[in-house]
Amino acid sequence: MKSHARVVVIGGGVVGCSVLYHLTKFGWSDAVLVERSELTSGSTWHAAGGMHTINGDPNVARLQKYTVELYKEIEAYSGQDIGLHMTSGMMLAATKDRFDWMKSILAKGRYMGLEAELLTPKEAHALMPLLDPDQFVGAVYDPVEGHLDPYGTTHAYAKSAKKNGAEIYLHTKVEDLVQLPDGTWRVITNKGEIVAEHVVNCGGLWAREIGRMVGLELPVLAMEHMYLITEDMPEVIEFNRTQGRELMHCVDFDGEIYIRQERNGMLMGTYEKACRPWSPLSTPWDFGHELLAEDLERITPELEVGFRHFPAFNSVGIRKIINGPFTFSPDGNPLVGPVRGMTNFWSACAVMAGFSQGGGVGLALANWMIHGDPGFDVFAMDVSRYGDYATLGYTNAKVRENYSRRFSIRYPNEELPAARPLLTTPIYDRLKAAGAVFGASYGLEQPLWFAPEGTEDRFSWRRSTDFDTVGAEAKAVRASVGLMETSGFAKYAIRGSGAEAWLDRMLTPRMPAAGRMTLAPMLKEDGKLIGDFILGKLGEGDFLLIGSGIAEGYHMRWFERHLPKDGSVELAALGLSLTGLAIAGPNARAVMQKLTHHDLSDAAFPFMTIRRLDLGMAPAIVGRVSYTGEIGYEIWMKPEYQRYLFDLLMEAGAEFGIRLFGLRALNALRLEKSYGSWAREYRPLYGPVEAGLDRFVAVGKEAAFVGKAAALKEKAEGGSLRLRTFILEATDADVIGDEPIYLDGAVRGWVTSGGYAHAAGVSVAIGYVPKEVADVEEGWSVELLGVQLPARLQRAPLHDPGGARMRG
């Protein structure tokens, strides 16, 4: 066994072997994989082996498409038969709501070039005669689906990696990981030690145990998963004989089952409501090529629906039942990327759909390790998307919920209840008493809207019970004054003698003067957006940075990677040690002025001012800025003062009819200003020129900020896309994001976000289109729930295009 290697990959399942292969493919031949037993031990060997390209997140779908396209390449390169069956597949809908959901998924695929299409039940039956067309309302056909041999595929990755120079050590159990002062790792195994520059945790069922060796509690849990294989079916044999091909893969979402052909019979699996975690506290090291006890009774409700939807199953026996553990994260997506706070320790685990996503995970991680960037926007899979709130108990509750709902509809306005409430602010009870309907983001309960008594969210793809109330909240802000909680934003304190110089290198704008704020994009080395913030300078060497709450861990990892080693910069994520309120509307200044003796006139406290002020008896940080397009103030305070300031603001605003508003009204208000948001308009796919943020990129400043060379190039060449706002002729539904944008009937772009702009009374979509057509006036449309709606290019913001109300 080697004593030194550039990288050690821990785990010989399909993901570990994919990571090893991609590292060697891109030049890191000094790579080792260690596996405690044999390759495929754990979850891989008993997987059903299905694969598909369609995913609700288009960025994950791109990686799945890459994975499927990779299989013929590794089969040819390795000489290993992978048992590839490209059968095509269908997603089936038994309800109208499900069919609406499928239309949205199909629409997302259009701008990615996926060749899926809608089918009637009769057309679906012609392709898959085992189904009863009377049980369904429609289907989506996908030509790029199928299944393969898990053993053969894993060995194809492994043989390809070995051909590229990698070494694989079987029956080599990792017993400890110790980082040395120079940043390298001692990988201590039962057969000796390897000192490595990088370690990758592809431990699968043992990913938690590998993480615990370095003090990390990964949010991952194994669940029992069952599928059955039937005896030979005459209908299958006859179809193969007459059609000359296999029956296709089908996912019956309403039945919560999936089926595919297995030899002369069929395989049927389910994600059952009565789900069961496996070994929830720790995974036994001696577990291997074993199955769990059969428990058909637990999945009987799903099987009964499956047998009704596919009647041929009623007349055939069961040949085999497979029950084995698979790992899941709380949201079902993988946990991939560098682990914050550690040098060269990488995660590639919780890849439940290993044969759909394993290749893409390997590609992204290899890019990340070798080039410093995954090459894609992989935030949906990034291990940093969870904070310290994702404890063992939280993970258990959310994974169970996710598993039991894997084939359920997630409506745009639906908030899932498991593991809630967890994080709350001091005014949570005040807001709840006022009718707040909460959503959870990064573990924190945040008000979405304030429901009148007796009203609650009705989950729907179309406008729902919140529509009129959200409209009233938005209109109250435009007409007078509104108050919302903003504790969910990420807050960072940056202090020290080197703080300003460091921020000047990290962020693109010119540094603000003391008492001032600026919008502050942040770029990667390739010039793409990795963050957008509000930066306030409270004093010399004293800065407050405000950003997206869901990206706190993601951004802290980036910041910490770039911190100077000399201790001149102190960086802290403030979390709930700093809570927030925001007040906005034409009467916001009048309300605020009642709370302080400081002059808040435009001359004394102009737009983008930030200061420490006493409001009533409470110390606070007050910034004159608003995401609503109205005059407004963001107020930050220690949590012990939040209840006092909330009550004070509500009392002071009573004479103006102050109204509480939530995130849904805020979305409606920002759409009227064509304001973008992080993870939608602003993400690592786009440059600042494309996103319309180039005015905040000071390419002329002296500091060589990260991505400056690429930003100069984009400025000179103009990028390839432009962010544009469209008004839709919508009636009872609004876009939510990822819908295709058409020009003269051809797909030319995609929606990043949208909704109904209540004060303006129109439906809005914001999205990216090629710069060559970005100013074309006529011929636009946007697909929504299977219908192409005429769209009008909106050149200027709908509300106050010159910004006079916000600045006045």
Image (cartoon, rainbow, N blue to C red):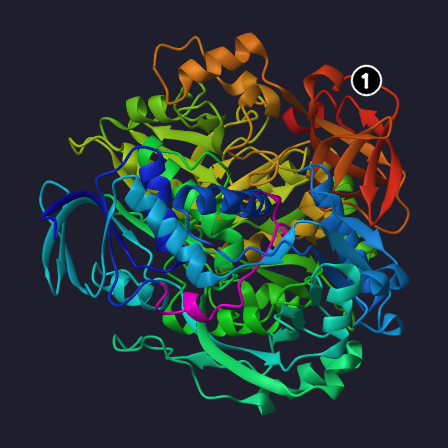
Residue at 52 percent across and 20 percent down: it is: 696
Among the 4 quarters of the image, the one containing residue 492: top left
Q: Is residue 347 left or right of residue 737?
A: left
Near-viewer residue (491 or 369)? 369
Q: Position of residue 648 (x, y in %)?
A: 56, 54
Residue position marked by numbered label 1 in the rendering: 776
Assess whether residue 672 is covered by the magenta stretch: no
Residue at 71 percent across and 50 percent down: it is: 143
Chief SS of the magenta region: loop
Q: Position of residue 561 (x, y in %)?
A: 28, 36
| Residue 657 vertical placement versus 744 (above, below) | below
Pick out the residue farthest to the bottom.
Answer: 297
Quarter occupied by the C terminus: top right
Q: Position of residue 693 (x, y in %)?
A: 57, 22
Q: Is residue 250 left or right of residue 732?
A: left
Residue 573 visible to an observer of this rendering: no
Near-viewer residue (57 or 650)? 57
| Residue 727 vertical placement versus 295 (above, below) | above
Q: Position of residue 443 (x, y in %)?
A: 48, 60
Near-viewer residue (494 or 342)? 342
Q: Is residue 142 left or right of residue 615?
A: right
Q: Secondary structure at mark 1?
A: loop
Callout 1: 10 Å neighbours few (<14), some, many (20+)? few
Q: Which residues are magenta?
A: 40-59
Assess whether residue 44 is covered by the magenta stretch: yes
Residue at 77 percent across and 80 percent down: it is: 312
Near-viewer residue (84 or 223)? 84
Give amino acid for label 1: Val
Residue at 60 percent across and 25 percent down: it is: 691
Among the 4 quarters of the image, the one containing residue 257: bottom right
Q: Is residue 147 left or right of residue 399?
A: right
